[in-house]
């Protein structure tokens, strides 16, 4: 394997000149730069990333700790983060917390031991001791999707309140009045915020959210199935089940079908976090879509700003309602409360 001295000898320049060319320093003549790059190509030279990190105290590597790699939302988020990081000259190492605080801490410690330059985290629960310690110690960090109030960490997230209001307006326009929710963990900001937004939207129509219509899930399909079965066992089941994430919605759909019931004929279904699968279910599922790719790109840019000494910016992007057929017939497009995306899905 060629080393930097071999490149210098091949190009007929000093090692310092080769270093300046590789680091794109302006104080190198065009002729010397051309000879060095030709030598690099001829010898197949690749800079030693470890040695460079020791010199610069940077590895050009970011850590991403996500809550659940099996959730299509986080899969798409990770892809967007990797693409944007690569475009900015960084690599990404991903850790899957699997909604477990202790596993989140394991990944945070491992990533810091590998001398990453900064962390992107979607915190599970209300955080974990190791992650909280890293944030308080000043580790360059950005929260994405979820966040922990009170920490001085930039947050990149979607605001779903308007989309939830649009959903309730859509359901009200279809004549639904008994609306239930499968909530995510209350210790997560997304879990508590979506329930609060749902209550507020119902109140605007004079509707309430009874305790019996509030089921506690954990952002996993099995909890969506369990809570929906509880709803169906009520003397007066809800007319609509709103699942606060996509996996719980899939579990809810399984529970309805297991009873020999149909969506939306017997009970309507809607979800937070749109995923490609929802177009292919029968019927296609009405869902609130977050701008996942834009969130991933914005999170990387905020973290790189922090790493490179620029003031990072928190970013909030709007979510939107995508109306399909899982809540009933399409409403009158002239309904005064409609502000949604209508798709021509089957």
Image: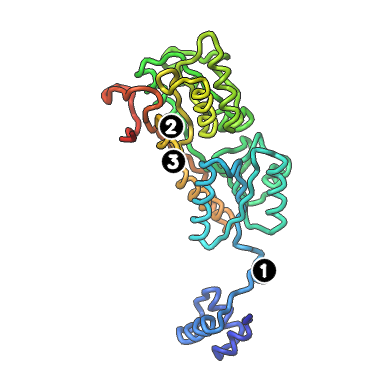
101 relative to 37, above or below: above
Q: Is residue 137 visible?
A: no
Q: CA distance from mark 3 to mark 2?
A: 11 Å
Of all residues shown, which one is farthest toward the left? 334
Marks 2, 1: nearer the viewer: 2
Q: CA distance from mark 2 to mark 1?
A: 45 Å
Q: Is residue 92 left or right of residue 327?
A: right
Marks 3, 1: nearer the viewer: 3
SS state under label 2 = strand
SS state under label 1 = helix
SS state under label 3 = helix
Residue with the mark numbered 1: 50
Residue 323, position as x, y percentages in the image? 37, 30
Crowdedness near tag 2: few (<14), some (14–19) or many (≥20) residues, C-alpha within 10 Å = many
Q: Nearer the viewer, residue 306 or 107?
A: 107
Residue at 41% in and 31% down: 282
Quadrant for residue 205, please give it: top left
Crowdedness near tag 3: few (<14), some (14–19) or many (≥20) residues, C-alpha within 10 Å = few
Q: CA distance from mark 3 to mark 1?
A: 40 Å
72 relative to 37, above or below: above
Disc with the residue nearer the chain's start (3 vs 2): 3
Of all residues shown, which one is farthest toward the top? 235
């Amino acid at each position: 394997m060629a080393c930097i001295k071999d490149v210098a000898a091949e190009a007929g320049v000093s090692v310092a000149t080769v270093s300046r060319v590789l680091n794109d320093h302006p104080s190198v003549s065009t002729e010397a730069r051309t000879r060095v790059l030709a030598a690099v190509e001829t010898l197949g030279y690749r800079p030693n990333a470890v040695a460079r990190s020791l010199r610069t105290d940077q590895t050009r590597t970011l850590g991403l700790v996500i809550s659940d790699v099996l959730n299509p939302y986080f899969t798409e988020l990770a892809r967007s983060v990797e693409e944007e990081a690569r475009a900015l000259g960084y690599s990404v190492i991903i850790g899957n917390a699997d909604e477990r605080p202790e596993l989140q801490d394991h990944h945070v410690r491992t990533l810091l031991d590998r001398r990453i330059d900064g962390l992107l985290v979607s915190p599970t629960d209300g955080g974990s001791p190791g992650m909280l310690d890293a944030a308080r110690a000043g580790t360059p960090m950005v929260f994405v999707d979820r966040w922990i109030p009170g920490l001085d960490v930039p947050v990149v997230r979607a605001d779903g309140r308007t989309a939830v209001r649009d959903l309730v307006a859509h359901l009200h326009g279809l004549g639904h009045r008994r609306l239930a929710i499968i909530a995510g963990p209350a210790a997560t900001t997304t879990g508590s915020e979506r329930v609060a937004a749902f209550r507020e939207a119902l109140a605007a129509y004079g509707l309430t959210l009874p305790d019996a219509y509030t089921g506690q899930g954990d952002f996993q399909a099995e909890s969506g199935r369990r809570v929906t079965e509880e709803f169906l066992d009520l003397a007066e089941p809800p007319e609509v089940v709103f699942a606060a994430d996509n996996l719980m919605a899939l579990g809810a759909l399984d529970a309805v079908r297991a009873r020999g019931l149909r969506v939306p004929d017997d009970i309507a279904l809607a979800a937070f976090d749109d995923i490609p699968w929802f177009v292919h279910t029968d019927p296609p599922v009405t869902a609130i879509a977050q701008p996942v790719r834009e969130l991933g790109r914005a999170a990387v840019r905020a973290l790189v700003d922090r790493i490179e000494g620029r003031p990072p910016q928190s970013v909030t992007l709007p979510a939107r309602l995508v109306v399909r057929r899982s809540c009933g017939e399409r409403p009158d497009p002239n309904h005064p409360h409609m502000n949604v995306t209508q798709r021509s899905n089957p």
